[in-house]
Image (cartoon, coloured by chain):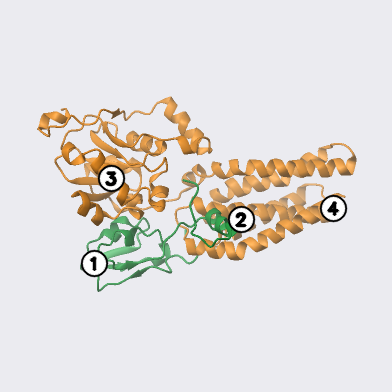
Amino acid sequence: MGPGSCGCGHAGPPQTLGAKIGWRDVLGGWKVRWGFGRAQYTVAPGLYRVGAPDCGSPVLVTANYKLTVDSVRRSLVGLSVWLLVMDTKGVNVWCAAGKGTFGTEELVRRIQAVNLREVVKHRELVVPQLGATGVAAHDVKRATGFSVHYGPVRACDLSAYLAAGMKATSAMRRVTFGWKERLAVAPVELVAAVGPLLAIATFVAALDVFRHHRLTADALTGMVPFLAAVLTGGLVVPWLLPWLPFRAFALKGAVAGALVAAAMLWWLPVGAVEGTGAALLVMAITSYMAMTFTGSTTFTTLAGVRAEVRWGLPPILIAAGAGVILRVAGAL
Amino acid sequence: MRYLLSGHSLALDPDLCNGCGRCEEVCPHGVFSVTDRKAAIVDREACMECGACRMNCALNAIAVSSGVGCAAAVIGVLRRGDGGAEACSCG
């Protein structure tokens, strides 16, 4: 049934979004997870058809980050709905809601821009629950007449939510942070560490040349602790997050770093001074990387992070400074 | 998982609450529960202070000092030294 067939007198917007995900979408998803071209991975804002919606079909609201739109349409296979894509500057729902771009103002503007009142007969919207930090449901209702129903947190629960008559179970309402979710957000931090790692490698190689008057295998051995530290801070800490002791991420990272440092001192042939320096640097790296992982999680508070930075950053900087001095002194 | 200072700034005025249930609906951590047409904070420690409940409380019965718990943003403010607000730069 086409949009015109129920007498709404509106041809509807031109674009149809398939629910099927192709190889280009899969490849694109991988690319942005590693931080490449993330700022340009967008879908044009507006109203889209998924399947063959009519004037009685539900209207789902989402952000214009393509990874977000893809996960929504993947969950809508076999359904006919309207998809209202807001202009969130290519940012996902949760982060855009925090910034206010996924917000009441943009939602009201978008409803009017696509003339939604003429497209559907009902006055109901399904807004993702994680958009609620930016959207005031009562204000949207007042401005447009549309009632907001907060949908499930995860797009994969959308069809079950719609089938249940827009009812979410409490499990659909909860944000989780399992190991798969933790590792899915880890690559960006690893990519950010590549630059600093190259700088460290240059420094370690320079020290080696200074000591031996040529580049030796010691330079490679010297890089092992730093590689281990970055992999620990960027992957192992996110993976083992619930099991590492303490609530402060900086402390979780320091504990993981201490284990790496202990293993390094045990296995690698390093002198006491140089080894202590490397150990301090390893702990500073893992602690810092763990602390910055707070931004990728689903349960940290701004007040807590402020406290953590205030108490955690000075020791990290001191450890790093002392580590550099000892590492250099030991190598000379 | 629990974090530091979770939910410290969250406050609910039961006298203003009409039990509409929006806070319970939007909270991703199950902090609220509505019984007998009144909301109550049942798990304060799970609160990440995102502000969704306050945003959607039509009667302004909820107060919370919200923001994004991101160390990179907090450190960014320290580096700029302008005492401004933490801006999320990741997207």
> Mark 3 — on which chain does it sit?
A
A201 to the left or right of A299: right
Q: Which mark is residue A2?
A: none
Answer with left or right where residue A14 lies relative to residue A239: left
For residue B61, which quarter of the picture?
bottom left
Q: In this view, does A242 lie above or below A118?
A: below
Mark 3: amino acid? Arg
Q: Position of residue A91 (x, y in %)?
A: 42, 43
Q: Mark 1 points at which residue?
A: B35
- Residue with the mark numbered 3: A109
Disc 4 target residue: A330
Dot 3 or dot 4, earlier in sequence: 3
Give the spatial CA distance, label 1 vs label 4: 66 Å
Q: Distance between the residues labelled 2 and 4?
A: 25 Å
Do discs 1 and 2 share a chain?
Answer: no
Mark whose residue sits in front, 3 or 2: 3
Percent coordinates x, y for residue A127 in the rendering = 29, 47
Please tell me whether mark 2 sits on a helix, a strand or a loop.
helix
Tell which chain the image draws in orange. A
The chain containing the residue under callout 2 comes to A
Where is mark 2, residue-wise? A253
Q: In this view, does B16 lie above or below A256?
A: below
Residue A165 visible somewhere in the drawing: no
Give how far across and how far down residue A269 sits, in percent.
Answer: 82, 47
Q: Which amino acid lies under the numbered mark 2 shown in the image of this protein?
A: Gly
